[in-house]
Image (tube, rainbow, N blue to C red):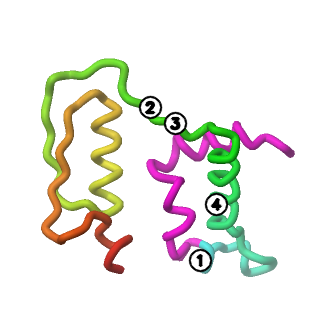
Amino acid sequence: RNQWKEAFLRLKRTNNFPEFTGRVCPAPCEGSCTLGIIDDPVGIKSIELSIIDRAWKEGWMAPNPPKNRTGKKVAIVGSGPAGLAAADQLNQMGHEVTVYERSDRVGGLMMYG
């Protein structure tokens, strides 16, 4: 329906990192999609990837720092998807966030499987 910007804004509201989840997520939800009983399951991975690729092409992907800082500091232990999403949400609330990771690279399951 050519509502790419609306799709992107909705995706950003429900996914902290659509710019890489569409590329690295193994999409287990597709195999569990109940539509698959009677038809092809929803190809959410390819849909999200198409939306985010369009957002990059159109220049909609941009940093969105919080308008105000609270002065509070928060530590997140673990840099997997959940840790990074928590850090992003807390940063958007204005807190100063530090993420700690024991491995040599960030990413958790996305990096090491």
Q: Which labelled disc corresponds to residue 51?
A: none
> Is mark 3 in CB contact (under 8 Å) with mark 2?
yes
Q: Secondary structure at mark 3?
A: loop
Mark 1, mark 2: which one is toward the viewer? Answer: 2
Q: Amino acid at mark 3?
A: Ala
Q: Read off the magenta span.
A: 1-29
Q: CA distance from mark 2 to mark 4?
A: 20 Å
The image quadrant where one finds the N terminus is top right
Q: CA distance from mark 1 to mark 2?
A: 34 Å
Q: Main secondary structure of the magenta part?
A: helix
Q: Residue at x 19, y 70 (%)?
A: 104
Q: Amino acid at mark 2?
A: Asn
The one of 17 and 63 positioned closer to us in this rendering: 63
Q: Which residue is mark 3?
A: 62
In the rendered image, residue 10 lying in the magenta stretch gets the answer: yes
Query: Between disc 3 and disc 4, whose residue precedes?
Result: 4
Q: Residue at x 32, y 58 (%)?
A: 82
Rendered location of residue 6, percent (x, y):
70, 37
Number of other residues with Cα within 10 Å of mark 2, as a class: few under 14, some 14 to 19, many 20 or more = few
> Is mark 2 in CB contact (under 8 Å) with mark 4?
no
Rendered location of residue 50, percent (x, y):
70, 58
Q: Which labelled disc corresponds to residue 64?
A: 2
Number of other residues with Cα within 10 Å of mark 1, as a class: few under 14, some 14 to 19, many 20 or more = few
Q: Secondary structure at mark 4?
A: helix
Q: Which residue is mark 4?
A: 49
Q: Which residue is mark 1?
A: 32
Residue 76 as seen in the image, left or right of residue 84: left
